[in-house]
Image (tube, rainbow, N blue to C red):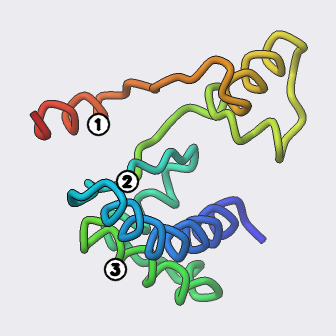
Amino acid sequence: MTSTEAEVKAAGLLAQTLEYIVPLWSELAGSKHGSVRCIMDNQTAIKQVSKGSDAPAAAPYLRHKRMVEEKVYRGLMWFDFIHGQLNIADVLTKQVRSTPEFKTKDAALSGCVPRVFETENMSRFLLNTK
């Protein structure tokens, strides 16, 4: 499986989960929940699910790709690129280069040191929601 295929399939699982969680959250909060920011470190996967680009290599995971595209189009979720070194999920899937990197990612994953990765896309999103 390619990295892009793995990322798109993981995004498909996330999309299925959000399909049920977001309406529940909206009901509990008493107001409509906004679009959910999903951080990904694979620009090709982001392009495929966000901009509708097709490639022959996407054929094996086309069903997952189409499902995620539909959720993005509906405004349920949106994807933001984050560099792999900052991606806290990598501690679960890749070899961590150093102890400080592990401690930083572990603290963010456990919620001890929550962060918002303010990218250019996130800044635009925050400006549009005010």
**Regarding mark 2 in the picture, which secondary structure is present there?**
strand
| Depicted 9 relative to depicted 40: above or below | below
Q: Quadrant of residue 96?
A: top right
Number of other residues with Cα within 10 Å of mark 1, as a class: few under 14, some 14 to 19, many 20 or more: few
**Regarding mark 1 in the picture, which secondary structure is present there?**
helix
**Regarding mark 3 in the picture, which secondary structure is present there?**
helix
Residue bearing the label numbered 3: 70
Q: Quadrant of residue 94?
A: top right
**Placement of the C terminus among the 4 image quadrants:** top left
Residue bearing the label numbered 1: 121
| Depicted 108 relative to depicted 100: above or below | below
The answer to which of marks 3 and 1 sits earlier in the sequence is: 3
Please state which amino acid type lies under the numbered disc 1. Asn
Q: Residue at left 58%, top 88%?
A: 59
* Left or right side of 106 for 62: left
Number of other residues with Cα within 10 Å of mark 3, as a class: few under 14, some 14 to 19, many 20 or more: some
The answer to which of marks 3 and 2 sits earlier in the sequence is: 2
Q: Residue at left 39%, top 48%?
A: 37
* Left or right side of 31 for 1: right
How far is mark 3 from mark 1, CA to CA? 20 Å
Specify the farthest residue to the top: 100
How far is mark 1 from mark 2, CA to CA? 13 Å
The answer to which of marks 1 and 2 sits earlier in the sequence is: 2
